[in-house]
Image (tube, rainbow, N blue to C red):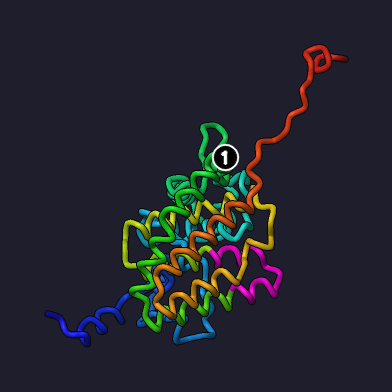
Amino acid sequence: MPSSATKSAKKSTKKSPGQANARATDQASGQTSSKTVDPATNPANAPSPAEGFNGAFSLPPGPALEICLRLQNAIIEHRLQPGTRLSEDEVGEIYGAGRTVVRSALQALAHSGLLEIRRNRGASVAKPTVGDAHEVFEARALIEPEVARRAAARISDADLARLKAHIEAEHEALADSDMGRALALSGLFHIEIAGIAEHSVYAAMIQSLITKSSLIIALYWVRPDTACESHAHHALLDAFVKKDGDAAHAIMRSHLIDLHSGLNLKPPVRKETSLAEALAGG
């Protein structure tokens, strides 16, 4: 039977999504690093959405993956809004890449659901429907509370320090009036919790759902006060410190219901117009 020391040693080797993807991002840009930087032990290195939203792209390290990650980060941070068209030629000019490389990156983003590619129209940032928005947040409300419960039972001191760093980075982004980055960091906070829970299937599902949530928030958000409500993340952190799984479950569920309620998902009210009125003067 493994000793507690052995279990602790195994626990300490676990990498967060941010740590693992930092190495992948370096490889994509052609750089290598002899060690992984951990925000928990290096406070000067703030959590980066680019490191957490890796999208599970099936691309080898290289220019296509680098372009893919950069475009993804721009979408997650709302610098590229839903519906924005992405011309292969323009993207290639910006990043100094050929059309074949750019096309590979755009196709990978389309496979992840961040882009839509239509024949004769090219690629554009996806625009989730109202139905999509309900489904995404309903799914999150079912999955993430249980993930939070699992995380509370497994969380380490290093994990707690990393989550605290995320909350501080959110505050800094808000202080700088950078709402896009604050929202991206908020989503990454949830992805980190999924990593702590040590359930690969849940983690992949949550990353996909949160990536889609960024598009939904860009389209339907009407309550900025709940977008980055720090008290919910602080309450989750307190529950994790106490290793209180039931509290973490309840707080996460309440938090996601509140986020869902902050979306304007009512169908537009259309004025009834008679045929005669519609065709008048035509």
* Left or right position of 118 against 276: left
Instruction: Quadrant for residue 146, please give it.
Output: bottom left
Q: Is residue 30 visible in this depiction of the protein? A: no
Label count reads 1
Q: Give the range drawn in magenta.
A: 170-186
* Picture coordinates of residue 246, whole percent (x, y): 41, 68
Residue lying farthest top? 276
Please name the residue shown 43% across and 71% down the image.
18
Image vertical order of residue 244 relative to residue 78, above or below: below
Residue lying farthest right? 281
Element under label 1?
A: loop
Instruction: Quadrant for residue 226, please give it.
Output: bottom right
Few, some or many C-alpha atoms within 10 Å of disc 1 (few <14, some 14-19, many ≥20)?
Answer: few
* Picture coordinates of residue 182, whole percent (x, y): 61, 67
Please name the residue shown 31% across and 63% down the image.
199
Image vertical order of residue 129 relative to residue 281, above or below: below
Please name the residue shown 38% across and 80% down the image.
36
Q: Does the magenta stretch include residue 176?
A: yes
Q: Is residue 166 visible in this depiction of the protein? A: yes
Going by the numbered disc 1, the residue's amino acid type is Thr
The residue to which callout 1 is attached is: 129
Which quarter of the image is occupied by the C terminus?
top right
* Left or right position of 75 against 55: right
Pick the front one: 262 or 72? 262
Pick the front one: 101 or 50? 50
Q: Is residue 246 magenta?
A: no
